[in-house]
Image (cartoon, grey):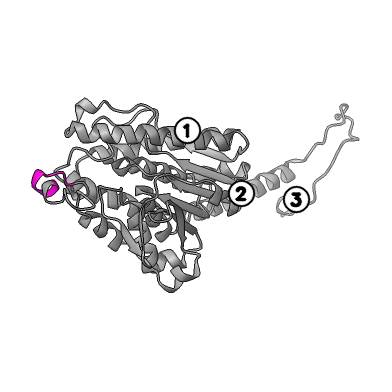
Amino acid sequence: MVKNQLIYQPLKVCASQKNNKRGLIIIDQPSLFLLKLIHLTLFAIFSIIKSIFKIFKIYSPKFLFHKKFKRTRKEDSVNLGKIGMIFDGGGNTCAYGTGFALAVENKGLRADYVLGVSGGALNGASYVERNGRTDKMILGWKDIETKGQSFLFDFGISSVIMRLRRTAILSNVGLRYLCQNLDMQAIIKSDIQFDVVVFDEKANRQKIFSNCQKEVQENPEILRKAIRASASIPGIFKSVNINGRDYCDGASFLIKPAIRAGCETIFLFLNEPLELESVETVEWGWFNRLLLGKHQIGRLLREARVSQYTSFLEELVVFQMPRGVPGLTSTSFEQTKNESDQGLISQAIDLACERGLEILDDLTLK
């Protein structure tokens, strides 16, 4: 009976005892047993709580490094502010812009402002429609990859000869199809500002249509037409009439609108790789040589415009591929037989995503 009572006695500190010459705290045997009991009880409680939390994924030592959250931990240390995203044109090579946007999404970042020109207007529209997600954009490119290059650029001899005396040598049926698949109401209602660059053929200057404009909000079809016009290469596709004026391909991206929108970080997606593929490796050499001349002029314009802003705008981040996917040009690519195949466009998206992640990692480490 006495032994049982000793278990509940308070701890005895015997620092003044004779055998405690070093001044150590000495605990008697019953109190030591009590400490072990408390320790085992706390350990059991902690283990139970940890197991419960782990089941419901509320907390675990690996929680902070969970894949879902790993994207944003590094970015939390760098304040990018209001993000602007500029999608450049380039026909089929706009698939690179999709990969860059996917990299931004994978890093847990989202644009507050988007500007698109030419084929980049379609990319930007899909991005805004999905409120900062790239899933529809990727599916759209996969659809084009399966349908083949003739879906957008039908260079069949009979088709071209029939249109030689018209204002455009190619049909815009494919382009209309892509634009009709856009949910204009979702784009108008999105909190992401979306600007589309077109070229006014009569005024001979660029013009912007935006989902923030009152006339566009009242009539969303104006913006749908503007997106189609922005991707309508002069002479290749027919111009688009909007409110009595003809508009065509916007020709080149603009940076000033993103600055005026208050963007603190601007992601510029350039789709043309630094190293161009030789024209001898593709069909319709004369036409591709013509496009090559256009690309060379466009490259000089882009380089001049980028260098103009990078000299004083530190917030401009340029995304560009060192080299492209062999066989993928602005107007041609090898068609895949089914959706499960890894075609050139899918390869371009994957490679651009990898490159984009590298650029973003360098950005967040600064």
Furthest residue in direction left, as rendered:
158
Q: Quadrant of residue 340?
A: top left
Callout 2–callout 1 Cβ contact below 8 Å = no
Mark 2 falls on what kind of element?
loop
Tell me, for residue 34, which label it has, or none: none
Identify residue for label 1: 303
Tell me, for residue 6, which label it has, or none: 3
Tell me, for residue 81, which label it has, or none: 2
Q: CA distance from mark 2 to mark 1?
A: 26 Å
Q: Which of the two discs, 2 and 1, sits closer to the camera?
A: 1
Segment tinted magenta in the rendering: 154-160
Is 130 left or right of 156, judged from the image as shown? Answer: right
Q: Nearer the viewer, residue 8 or 189?
A: 189
Which residue is painted at 49% across and 51% down in the image? 54
Residue type highlighted by circle 3: Leu
Queried whether the magenta region covers residue 155, the answer comes back as yes
Mark 1 falls on what kind of element?
helix
Instruction: Give the x, y percent position of residue 61.
Output: 55, 43
Callout 2–callout 3 Cβ contact below 8 Å = no
Instruction: Give the x, y percent position of residue 196.
Output: 43, 55
